[in-house]
Structures are given as C-alpha cells and as structure tokens.
Image (tube, rainbow, N blue to C red):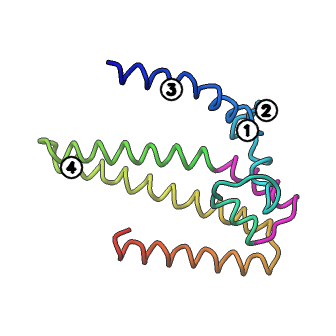
Amino acid sequence: MRCHSKILLLSLLTLPLQSTTIFANPLFEQNCSLPNCQNHIYAQRSGEGPRRGRGKTEKLIEELNLNDNQVQQLNAIRQKYRPQMQQLREQMQATRQELSQMMQGNTSTTDLRKKHQQVIDLDQKLHNLRFENMLAIREILTPEQRRQFAQLMEQRRANRRNGARFGR
C-alpha cells in the first residue's frame, strides 16, 4: 500500500511536466487537429523545427524536393483519397472477418463463395483507388521527379518483398 502511495504522489508531481510538453506542441498551440494541419506538418523540412520521425509523405516531400505549391497539391490529394482508402480497408477487414467466421460454421459453399467475392471486389476497389492516387500525384511532378518517384516506389516494393522473405 505504501508503494502505491509513492507512485501516486510521483505521478501527481510529474503531471505538470507532462502538460507543458503538450502545450509546447505547435499543433496544440494552433488548436488544430491532424487533418486540418497537414500543411503545417508536411511543410516542415529538414532544419525547420523538431522531428521525432518522418512519415512516408514527409520523406517523399524531402526526397523529391517538392516546392510549396506541390506540397499543397500533395496534401489536397491525400485529403481526397485517404478517407476513401481507410473506409475500404475497414470494410475489407470486416468482410474478411465475416468470411473467417463463416468458414468455421456450417455456411453453404455458395454463401462462402459470395463472401469471398466481396473480399476480392473490395480489394480491387482499393487497388483502383491507390492507382488513382498515384496518377494524381504523378500529375503534380516534373519529369525528373516522376523518375525519382518511380525509383522510390520500386525500392519500397523491393523492401517489402525482402522484408516478407526474412520474416520482418
């Protein structure tokens, strides 16, 4: 019991330190949530503020040396496609789960085939949406940036293949 009191007291004493970290966050100061502040986040380039880790988009911006206009356009593309892709991923996950549960039960083969086709259809929709996203990104790039972009995508595919082979 005495140990719990010490932990509680320590937690209460460090709470002000934790809250200053939250208030020091520039996103918090601007009272913005992630979807509304993507321009701020993605516009950060090396040397312009603290970085803990870079996301795929930040790396892309830096590696392709996108200008401010391109960054704005990229953000608009992401805002357009991201929710649609997320919704499809969630639908596909739920449908796969349903199929898995159906496989464990006494569901007819016909119904299993229908559910499997739903998974395939959702997967195809997701692939088509990813392709449309890539085409939209391609449109904002210069010819040289397109070549770099294609190389980066090939590297990522190779990394995924190698990672799958080595049990990452």
The amino acid on which the numbered mark 2 sits, given as a three-letter code, is Glu
State the residue position of label 3. 10
Please name which of the two marks, 1 or 3, marks the residue nearer to the observer: 3
* Residue density around tag 4, few if under 14, some if 14–19, many if 20 or more, within 10 Å: few
The amino acid on which the numbered mark 4 sits, given as a three-letter code, is Thr
Q: How many badges with numbers are in the image?
A: 4
- Residue 47's quadrant in the figure? bottom right
User: Does the segment drawn in magenta span residue 167?
Assistant: no
Dot placed on the residue nearer the N-terminal end, 4 or 2: 2
Left/right placement of residue 76 relative to residue 100 reads right
Residue extending furthest toward the left: 106
Quarter of the image with the C terminus is bottom left
Quarter of the image with the N terminus is top left
In the picture, the disc for residue 25 is 1
The amino acid on which the numbered mark 3 sits, given as a three-letter code, is Leu
User: Does the segment drawn in magenta span residue 67?
Assistant: yes
Q: Which residues are magenta?
A: 64-81
